[in-house]
Amino acid sequence: MRNREGNKKLYVAILAAGQSKRMNSKISKVLHLLAGRPLLSYGIDIAQSLNPDEIFVVVGGPHKNSVMEKFKDAGVTFVEQAEPRGTGDAVMTVKEHVDPNSDLFVIPGDAPLLKKETARSLVDFHRGRGAIATVLTTEHPEPHGYGRIIRSVGDRIMMIVEEADAFPEEKAIKEINSGFYVFESEWLFKWLAEIRPDNRQKEYYLTDVIEILQRRIGGVYAYKIEDWRETIGVNTRKDLASAERIMQERIINCWTKRGVTFVRPEQVYIEYDVEIQEDTLIYPFVALLGKTKIGHDAVIGPGVILKDEEVKPGEVIWR
């Protein structure tokens, strides 16, 4: 996976070592399914779309082995975070694997809705500005739980304040940190060693390096996007349900544009890897699962559930 944009390499680090405590689950948060696929698969898809030199997945904790087993054939390099000491410590684990003359794109493993074109635009913005660090931001209508962006001048960032450490006036800010970053690797790792767990969570926040970089050398920018839904992170079952609603809307809209008719689109469930050809008619209360393939001019009647099945062109399924 060689990066073809000049001589500067591009690496991607996907952070997937969280403890998943708020999911109240015996499996890793990043293995929970969204439209039939594990959450982590979406981050890997984004990474692969950038054609980077290498993709790292940072794993750790009790779910480490299950995550590695699930994605052993995904073309990624696993790096272990020995203890759950925060995002800053997680990123530090890839230091020895990264060429200093490179950019490092950091992706949260639990944020599956970022579009590939947004990821590419973020990298292009970062490189176009000659930035030391670029943070993907957005205006969130309900910013509770997110780090707030404290701006300097124009697109420049002064710092990011985590929710738990924010003053009331900072909590009123609606521009939030998405958790997606692009860093110039040499400067990132030079100053990442300076961060300290001087916060209520006693963790090494990756966000702290933003203030350090801005103070020491500058060149820290915000790349702000309009659709805040692309930045949704999944920390709870409620978050997962919200992400599923958005993903289903995207999937239905995609197939509608390709010539599929839905009688009641809001009452149909379609998983990510399903394939449907044009002029198919789909009635309400249908569930299309797994790698189901539907030929053109087919009719799928009310209440039909198909999993890993193939429907021939013109076939009518009525149960």
Image: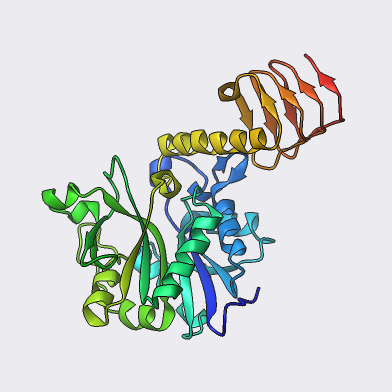
Numbered marks: total: 0
- For this orientation, the residue located farthest to the left is 168
What is the quadrant of the N terminus in the image?
Answer: bottom right
Residue 193 visible somewhere in the drawing: yes
Residue 81 visible somewhere in the drawing: no
**Above or below for 57 versus 215:** above
What is the quadrant of the C terminus in the image?
Answer: top right
**Above or below for 295 versus 26:** above
Corner quadrant of residue 229: top left
Q: Nearer the viewer, residue 147 or 266?
A: 266
At a point 52% along the width and 68% down the height, the residue shown is: 12
Q: Position of residue 28 (x, y in %)?
A: 51, 49
Q: How is the image coloured?
A: rainbow
Corner quadrant of residue 305: top right
**Above or below for 286 versus 171:** above
Q: Nearer the viewer, residue 24 or 120?
A: 120
Q: Position of residue 267 (x, y in %)?
A: 58, 21
Q: Nearer the viewer, residue 278 or 81?
A: 278
Please give left or right for residue 263 compared with residue 112 in the image. right
Corner quadrant of residue 209: bottom left
Please give left or right for residue 196 compared with residue 279 in the image. left
Q: Position of residue 273 (x, y in %)?
A: 69, 42
Please give left or right for residue 194 compared with residue 120 in the image. left
Q: Position of residue 317 (x, y in %)?
A: 81, 19
At a point 68% along the width and 18% down the height, the residue shown is: 283
Q: Nearer the viewer, residue 131 or 172?
A: 131
Please give left or right for residue 311 compared with residue 136 in the image. right
At a point 51% along the width and 36% down the height, the residue shown is: 244
